[in-house]
Image (cartoon, grey):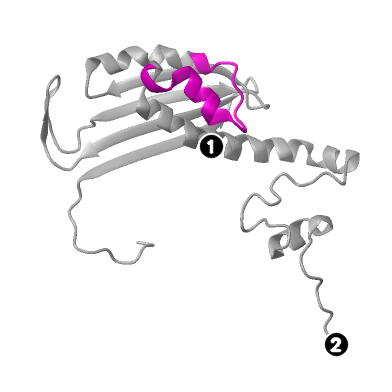
Amino acid sequence: MPLPAPSKRKHIHTRNILCEGYLRNDGLWDIEGHLKDTKSYPFKNNERGEIKPGTPIHEMWIRLTINDHLEIIEVEAKTDYSPFEICQDITPNFKRLVGLKIGPGWRNRALKKVGGTEGCTHLVELLAPIATTAFQTIIPIKDNRKSDIDSKVNPDAVPRLLNTCHAFRSDGDKAKELWPNFYNGPATKLKS
């Protein structure tokens, strides 16, 4: 376990989220998310009766089909398990995301389409890791496709990852190693 040993405790709840990205044969991308909640104890549900330990209280899926520009072309959403039968009625609303682009302001635009009573809290929660998965899936492949062209066309283009996190800060060792033209940290002292 990478964390320090915990205090004595009892397991109560598990939420599993799995997101995967795929390149389709037609050149589009499928980004899929799966959310599953389980309890370690049995409990009663008004519509489903007793829910045994390990049986999902929530299990939902969403697939965004997107293009290279991170624009949503198609959406599929499905609820296999929920506390109430009515929860499944809202999944068609997620098609409202078609036409949106994943990028700055994505979350707010998505919430306007499927937030609150227009959506499902759990499917909406999946949209954040799905967006990250889309970037992790598409950007490296897309960048590799065009890196030679871009470096020849515009060698002064600021690298996409510069200053996006601690490791890629412009005054850090990684910037110095990967993008020396954009490194702005202290000059290296020459060894005598």
Asked where in the image residue 123 lies, by quadrant, the reply is: top left
Left or right, residue 191 beside residue 43: right
* Helix, strand or loop under label 2: loop
Residue at point 27%, 43% (across, down): 14
Q: Position of residue 59 (x, y in %)?
A: 30, 28
What's the amino acid at mark 1? Thr
Residue where numbered disc 2 is placed: 192
* Position of the N terminus by quadrant: bottom left
Q: Residues within 10 Å of mark 2 (few under 14, many from 20)?
A: few
- Looking at the image, which residue sits at the far right? 153
Above or below — where is 52 with respect to 183?
above
Of callouts 2 and 1, the N-terminal one: 1
Residue where numbered disc 1 is placed: 133
Q: Residues within 10 Å of mark 1 (few under 14, many from 20)?
A: some
* Helix, strand or loop under label 1: helix
Magenta stretch: includes residue 109: yes
Q: What mark, if any, has residue 26 been given in the picture?
A: none
Q: Position of residue 29 (x, y in %)?
A: 59, 26
What's the amino acid at mark 2? Ser
Above or below — where is 117 with respect to 180?
above
Q: CA distance from mark 2 to mark 1?
A: 47 Å
Highlighted magenta segment, given as a residue range: 96-117
Left or right, residue 14 beside residue 126: left
Above or below — where is 160 with respect to 5?
above
Residue at point 62%, 22% (across, down): 71
